[in-house]
Image (cartoon, rainbow, N blue to C red):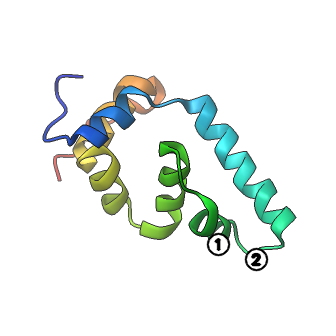
Amino acid sequence: MNALKNLTEQQRNFIANFDYEKLGRAIMGSVLGSAMAGHTTVAATAERYFKGSMEAEFIADIFKLKRTDAICDKWFGSRYNASVIAAHSMPSLATKKPSSK
């Protein structure tokens, strides 16, 4: 993935160690934990309790930051970088070329 541009050390670490299975468990746990805690939304659970791991913080940011560009900028350096990663890690999405926006 030499095409990735302007990454911080945290972003490089997140991308290098991205674990879909761990992320899936964290998403499932957020829904179950939200139900158990009696929260109205999963977002409330994520913002209140998701700290300590990259996956947990990533999920919390999905709720907190809301906009795709904000999430991509924080975690992948840019929307372009996120698109390049998607094309490499999710071949079914590779039919579209990454936008340079």
Q: Amino acid at mark 1?
A: Ala
Give the residue furthest to the front.
52
Q: Are marks 2 and 1 in contact (CB under 8 Å)?
A: yes
Q: Is 3 left or right of 90, judged from the image as shown? A: left
Q: Quadrant of the N terminus?
A: top left
- Identify residue type, mark 2: Thr
Compared across the picture, whether 83 is left or right of 49 comes to left
Between the C-alphas of marks 2 and 1, the distance is: 7 Å
> Does dot 1 land on a helix, a strand or a loop?
helix
- Mark 1, residue position: 44
Within the image, what quadrant is residue 36 found in? bottom right
The residue sitting at 38% across, 37% down in the picture is 14
Give coordinates of residue 44: x percent, y percent: 64, 72
Instruction: Kindly tell me whether residue 28 is visible in this rendering.
Output: yes
Can residue 95 be seen at all in this image of the molecule? no
Q: Is residue 11 left or right of residue 100?
A: right
SS assignment at label 2: loop
Q: Which residue is mark 2?
A: 40
In this orientation, which residue lies closer to the viewer: 95 or 81? 81
Q: Is residue 70 above or below residue 57?
A: below
Q: Is residue 62 above or below residue 9?
A: below
Residue 17, horizontal then vertical, whole percent: 43, 28
Residue under the image location 17 percent in, 22 percent down? 2
Question: Badge 2 local density, few (<14 within 10 Å), some, or many (20+)?
Answer: few
